[in-house]
Image (cartoon, rainbow, N blue to C red):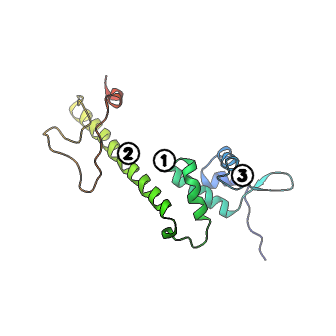
Amino acid sequence: MKAEQTFTIKQTADQTGISADTIRYYEKIALLPRADRKDNGHRIYRQKDINTIQLIACIKKTGMPLEKIRPFLEVANTADADPAEYPELVDLLKGHRENIINQISSLEQVVDFIDIKLAEGRYRRDCSDENQDGVSKKRWGEPESKPASPVEMRYFSI
């Protein structure tokens, strides 16, 4: 029988793109289970640990706080998990998705503002959803986004 391959913390960090310090932190807060140790005390990781770290990194890129990631990891470690069995997680993910869509919309307004500034060589007064001729640029199916606040607009003033 072939022994399961193990990895050092450095190898795990290299494979996941997550620093060794961050991996240790995830263990400390119990987001990851405590790593097994060699006789010399060095941590050893298995492929399932690497998969879990990659899942954490993927969800974290969406801006989800670590504490909200925990339930997803519990489900991910359940064999043959059916999302229908976890409606609260589905709702959480849908709400998080909606927040991301709103953030994208806000960022698109900023990009539009920058494009106009670069093209025309002048500033717009706001980042509203209307272009210069008063026509709404809202795309079908996108959520309503709010205009940039005066505080946000200070970042773009001279």
Pick the residue in front: 116 or 35.
35
Q: Which mark is residue 9?
A: 3
Whichever of labels 2 and 1 marks the residue nearer the N terminus, that label is 1
- The outermost residue toward the left is 133
Image coords of residue 138 (percent x, y): 23, 49
> Mark 2 is on which residue type?
Gln
Residue located beneath label 1 in the image: 63
Q: Secondary structure at mark 2?
A: helix
Q: CA distance from mark 2 to mark 1?
A: 11 Å
Quadrant including the N terminus: bottom right
Q: Do tag 2 and tag 1 residues touch (Cβ < 8 Å)?
A: yes
Q: Amino acid at mark 3?
A: Ile
Viewed as shown, does residue 14 lie left or right of 112? right
Q: Nearer the viewer, mark 2 or mark 3?
A: 2
Quadrant where the image shows the C terminus: top left
Q: Position of residue 21 (x, y in %)?
A: 68, 43
Pointer 2 residue: 103
Q: Is residue 146 found left or right of 23 in the rendered image?
A: left
**Regarding mark 1 in the picture, which secondary structure is present there?**
loop
Q: Is residue 77 above or below residue 20?
A: below
* Comparing labels 3 and 1, the label whose residue is closer to the camera: 1
| N-term mark: 3 or 1 | 3
Q: Secondary structure at mark 3?
A: helix
Question: Is 127 rendered above or below residue 2?
Answer: above
Q: Residues within 10 Å of mark 2 (few under 14, many from 20)?
A: few
Q: Residues within 10 Å of mark 3 (few under 14, many from 20)?
A: some
Q: Residue furthest right?
A: 39
